[in-house]
Amino acid sequence: MTGSVRRRRLTLVLLDGLDQYGPQVWKTLPDTSTGGAGVAKYHSIRDEILDLVAELTVGDALPAERTLAPRFGVSRMTLRRAVEELVREGRLVRRQGAGTFVAGPKIAQGLAVTSFSEDMRQRGAVPSSRTLAVDDVLAGAPLGRRLEISPGESVVRVTRLRLADDAPMAVETLHVPRSIAPGLDGTMLADGSFYELLHDVYGLELSGGVQTIEATVTDEMESELLGVPLHSPAFLFERISRDTGGRVVEFVRSVYRGDRYQFRVELQPARRPARTAE
């Protein structure tokens, strides 16, 4: 064909049975159809589903494929693609054997030293916790380095399920030097924030900390506790916090649901160094 260029359009095809890559994997294949009508139709269906979601409330079930496909005038495959994209975006949530439901809004968190409880209250949600395990362990070398204590010192390890409006949000494992918080046990953390406990019971104030955030997927235990499919996208938080005296008071590792959490960062232009006179 001379004098013109033919563009090849790519179609996204859902591949099943690839659990090692997560709940779903998308592959691009050449599409033999012509024009952009198929892509336009796909985006139109996605928008129509979003309009339907806007009429429902959080937790409502999406009508079945056999109902929606003829309603929108598309094949079940096209409908399924649009629904899967909205599941990945966190607009919808799929429950094994039950169907697809309207998801709640994502919780936005700024990058500051705040507790989970404080974050949830600021966003109008009711925070709560379920203590899963409490034990005393020796710090050992890796944990001792993080907490800046001797490997032979005792550490309180508390594993909790963190909830917002009774919905599971994160699995948290907290490590606290026993010398920092003598008498600390799981019942003291059942109803509130560890930072509030440090202030109210132990008279400690936080001065700051270092937190790392990276992408991960849920393992079997985390998936069961959070109510998500195995290998679901998640955020891994690791935080080391210090009091005003410079002591490390905690090392916490938390796995947050990727479909219910997002980060908000306010950006400002970097200050340019002042020019020096030549």
Image (cartoon, rainbow, N blue to C red):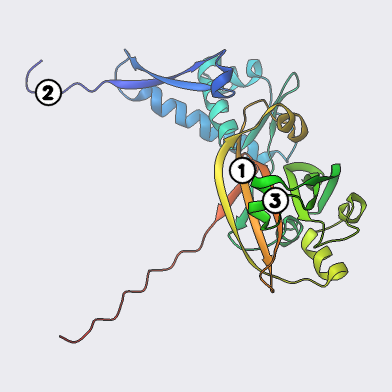
* Label 2 crowd bin: few (<14), some (14–19), many (20+), radius 10 Å: few
Residue drawn at x 74%, y 45% is 173
Q: Tell me if residue 139 comes above or below residue 132 in the rendering.
A: below
Q: Which residue is mark 1?
A: 236
Residue drawn at x 37%, y 69% is 270
Give the x, y percent position of residue 70.
58, 17
Horizontally, residue 276 falls left or right of residue 23, namely left
Q: Tell me if residue 93 comes above or below residue 159 in the rendering.
A: above
Q: Secondary structure at mark 1?
A: strand
Q: Tell me if residue 9 comes above or below residue 86 in the rendering.
A: above
Q: In which image quadrant can residue 180 be found?
A: bottom right
Disc sitting over residue 252 in the figure = 3
* Distance between the alpha carbons at the discs numbered 2 and 1: 50 Å
Give the x, y percent position of residue 176.
77, 55
Q: Secondary structure at mark 3?
A: strand
Q: Quadrant of the C terminus?
A: bottom left
* Distance between the alpha carbons at the discs numbered 3 and 2: 60 Å
Residue lying furthest left: 2
Q: Tell me, yes or no, whether the two marked residues, 2 and 1, touch with CB atoms within 8 Å.
A: no
Q: In which image quadrant can residue 100 be found?
A: top right
Give the x, y percent position of residue 23.
59, 23
Kind of residue indicated by mark 1? Leu
Q: Tell me if residue 156 comes above or below residue 48 in the rendering.
A: below
Horizontally, residue 86 falls left or right of residue 101, namely left
Question: In the rendered structure, which disc, 3 or 2, sits on the residue that comes first in sequence?
Answer: 2
Residue lying furthest bottom: 277
Q: Tell me, yes or no, whether the two marked residues, 3 and 2, touch with CB atoms within 8 Å.
A: no
Q: Which residue is mark 2?
A: 4
Question: In the rendered structure, which disc, 1 or 3, sits on the residue that comes first in sequence?
Answer: 1
**Residue 53 or residue 130, whichever sits in front:** 130
